[in-house]
Image (cartoon, helix red, strand yellow):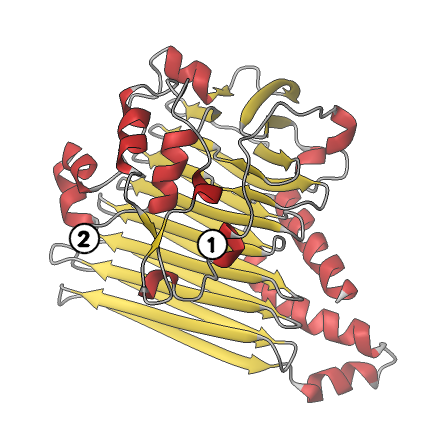
Amino acid sequence: MVTELPTQLLNATPTGRTVAGSLQTRAWDMLGGVTLPTHQSEEWRYIPMRLLSEITWQEPVAATVSAADLLDIPVASQAESLAVIVNGTFRADLSHGLEGLAVEGLAAAISMGKADKLGQLADLDTTSFEVAAHHGVLRKPGIDLFARLNTATFTDGVYCRLEKDAQVAAPIVFLFLTTGSATRVSPRVYFVAESGAEATIVEVHATLGSEPTLSLPVTEAWIAPNAKIEYVKLQIEGPAARHIALTEVEQSGDCTFKHYNVSYGSLLTRNDVNCAIIGQNAHTRLDGVTCIAGEQLVDNHTRLDHAMPNCESFEAYKHLLDGKSTAVFNGKIFVYQDAQKTDAKQTNQTVLLSPTATMNTKPQLEIFADDVKCTHGATVGHLETSMQFYLQSRGIPASEARALLVYAFAAEVLDQIESEPVREELESLLFAKLRQS
């Protein structure tokens, strides 16, 4: 059964969408005749599309947000360098600490010709991947409907370019706030780390209020040789929020890129994180922590493309599922014929905290080289009662003992984050969430 893209989801016009010129016009034209995926689609089989089509989403409007509204938002509230985007629009009045950094609104950057590679990674169909020859090799043919919808409708976002050999000590935080009932936003991030640059970037997605919202963020990132980038995406949106995100990364050789995907909020979350390694001697981490309860659903898909030799990648995703929540992990690693001496390890582990929680996991390796070390593994289980009993026997209340054990399980991923303030805040947030469950 095919479901046409409902007007409730689209509900927008191309008028005035000239911030990215022909790119957006083409995206808009390509939306014609596009259909929503169904459960018959392997990539989307666990997403209940009714959660997207049962609401008539509205285009974002200017919202009244003050600095006081940011005080309770984790990570962002303490950030030295903060870029705030409200309902998809960059807000200079709420941002601070960006002096000396090439961080600004994306629309302004586009108007000055800075975002010259916009759309090369995340859009729109196979023809855009012909811009560079290796794209045609690395990426599968196909269409990402929601990335296309983002391209057709985005009006602003964040532009960030770290200059050659830039060393940024404090984390740079991009805060995406969505507010207003049935608001649909399509924020965009354009991130470039030039050769030798080092920094920690934190992308925080939050909502003000508990009304339903739909966020369709797209991030494109280019990592140059000898750069060292730690990129954290934190999703803490409200209980009625829908969040469908795409992150596309192109990683050069002799550099390090670490991505941490942390999902604590929203009713429905879909994360696609794709990284193409196109140079030798690259080091990559794709890690994630999901902690959900109630009827929340988080669907994590990752893809690593090893195209060159002598690279290593490590991937660890951990899921904590309570209530009637559902999670999905689909991790793909492709090792191409030229990628000899690749070392790739992938694992995903789940603890079911409730008999009614559900985990669906599918690790996937496709190897076309013969001199590689590649492994993957998946486990799904319950909390060990003996360990909980041991802690209780030493005077720790049952709820506290349970939270400690689960926290230790998930913190193994968060402990990898090198930025101490970011790591500590995410761990505190996780522990607080576990104590509430």
Q: Gap between marks 1 and 2, in whole Å? A: 31 Å
Tell me what residue is drawn at x 33 percent, y 13 percent.
113
Tell me what residue is drawn at x 62 percent, y 55 percent.
264
Q: Tell me, yes or no, if residue 146 can be seen here.
A: yes
Q: Quadrant of residue 110?
A: top left
Find numbered disc 1 in the image and state the secondary structure of the residue it sits on: strand
Image location (x, y in percent) of residue 119: 30, 31
Tell me what residue is drawn at x 58 percent, y 34 percent.
176
Q: Is residue 341 left or right of residue 84?
A: left
Find numbered disc 2 in the image and state the secondary structure of the residue it sits on: loop
Does 30 appear above or below 299?
A: above
Image location (x, y in percent) of residue 256: 37, 44
* Mark drawn on residue 270: 1
Q: Quadrant of residue 374?
A: bottom left
For marks 1 and 2, the one nearer the N-term is 1
| Quarter of the rendering occupied by the N terminus | bottom left
Q: Given contact means CB atoms under 8 Å apart, are the residues at marks 1 and 2 in contact?
A: no
- Please tell me which residue lies in front, 335 or 303: 303
Amino acid, disc 1: Arg
Tell me what residue is drawn at x 33 percent, y 26 percent.
24
Amino acid, disc 2: Pro
Image location (x, y in percent) of residue 382: 60, 82
Image location (x, y in percent) of residue 222: 33, 34
Instruction: Farthest residue to the top: give it.
Output: 112
* Mark drawn on residue 309: 2
Instruction: Farthest residue to the right: give it.
Output: 395
- Few, some or many residues within 10 Å of mark 2 (<14, 14–19, 20+): many
Q: Quadrant of residue 20?
A: top left
- Few, some or many residues within 10 Å of mark 1 (<14, 14–19, 20+): many
